[in-house]
Amino acid sequence: MASTHTKFYLDKMNAKWKGVCAGIADYTGINAMWVRLGAVMLTLMGGFPWTIIAYFVAAWMADKKPIHLYADQEEQKFWQGVRQSPQRTSKDIRGRFRQIDRRLADIELYYTSNNKVLADEIENLR
């Protein structure tokens, strides 16, 4: 079962006609104008019947995008990154956790060291 964040949706909020190009733009993170321009160019350069058929099939098969799919712009960019390159996103998250782990290790080392000034301050707080 696919996550709701990684599924293709028709974007009716930013649609010009049926929302397919806006949905592709939302799915990939590309500006909708460039997706529309690419669709027109593909249609004019000889793909006329197939691009029109594919457009109507996508409009017929895809669901409308839920209104509150993303909490904010940052979450939208994150899920677009997941769809574009899941490996890069997982490496980024792994790197963030390593950085947090290193910072916690530094705090733990400082706290458990034989720092007389820190030990005195902690004792004064008790």
Image: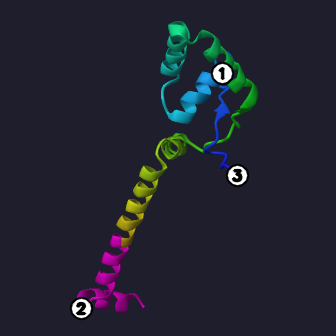
For disc 2, the marked residue is: 116
**Disc 2 to disc 3: CB gap under 8 Å:** no
Could you tell me how many numbered marks the image carries?
Answer: 3
Horizontal arrangement in the rendering, residue 26 relative to residue 3 (left or right): left
Can residue 14 be spotted in the picture? Answer: no
| Residue at the (32%, 88%) spot, across then down | 112
Image height of 66 relative to 115, above or below: above
**Nearest to the observer: residue 121 or residue 42:** 42
Horizontal arrangement in the rendering, residue 21 relative to residue 65 (left or right): left
**Nearest to the observer: residue 70 or residue 123:** 70
Position of residue 92 measured from the top left corner of the image (x, y, whole percent): 40, 55
| Residue at the (39%, 87%) spot, across then down | 125
| Residue at the (65%, 49%) spot, across then down | 3
**Nearest to the observer: residue 58 or residue 126:** 58
Give the quadrant of residue 14: top right
* Residue depth check, mark 3 versus mark 1: number of the one nearer the observer: 1
| Amino acid type, callout 3 | Met
Q: Which mark is residue 54?
A: 1
Range of the magenta residues?
102-126
| Residue at the (36%, 88%) spot, across then down | 122
| Amino acid type, callout 2 | Lys
Q: Secondary structure at mark 1?
A: helix
Marks 2 and 3, how far apart in space?
56 Å
Outermost residue on the right side: it is: 60
Callout 1: 10 Å neighbours few (<14), some, many (20+)? few
